[in-house]
Image: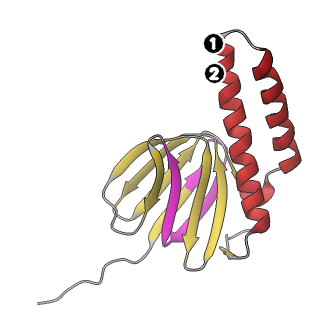
Amino acid sequence: MATTTPRRTLHVEVVTAERELYKGEATQVTAPGADGELGILPQHAALLTFLVPGELRIELGDAEEPFFVSGGFLEVSNDRVVVLADSAEEGETIDEARAVEARRRAEERLAEVQSQTERAELQAALQRALSRIKVAEYARRRNRRRIDIAGR
């Protein structure tokens, strides 16, 4: 009786409406799901979920690539992961100074705002800025190898 060897990688695509940021293999994908951080490994059950602003990390062996996603969807099916992000940035391309300034502005305005609607919008902006800062700092500090992305 013949047996098949289980697949040890995932095929991953990270896209926005404007461009494709990543297309390749991965041993693990970690994503900011609506109910918490998701870890996706080969042979993961089929899944469709919302993404919230945060870090999307793609790992291939000892190499990895961090991204910031502002939200979107993640679909897993048959060892294929598709991330359709509202917007996304590679960790290394995030302008950390701009993200720090966005955090400062959101914090200042939160202290003054009265409207619940505006407060919710500012809290979302603050969360995006904090997530972008976290991803940028991680990309800058990490000592792990980067995944070789074609065209870079």
| Mark 1: amino acid | Gln
Q: Could you tell me if the residues under marks 2 and 1 are in contact, i.e. CB atoms within 8 Å?
A: yes
Residue 142 located left or right of residue 78 = right
Residue at the top extreme, as displayed: 115
> Dividing the picture into quarters, in which one does residue 102 lie?
top right
Q: Which mark is residue 50?
A: none
| Mark 2: amino acid | Ala
Q: Is residue 106 visible?
A: yes
Q: Residue at x 53, y 58 (%)?
A: 13
- Rendering coords of residue 91 (x, y %): 73, 57
> Where is the N terminus found, in terms of image quarters?
bottom left
Indicate whether residue 49 is drawn in magenta.
no
Q: Which residue is mark 2?
A: 120
> Where is the C terminus found, in terms of image quarters?
bottom right
Q: Residue at x 84, y 34 (%)?
A: 104
Q: State the SS at label 2.
A: helix
- Rendering coords of residue 95 (x, y %): 84, 49
Magenta-highlighted residues: 14-33
State the separation of the CA atoms marked 2 and 1.
Answer: 6 Å
Q: Which residue is mark 1?
A: 116
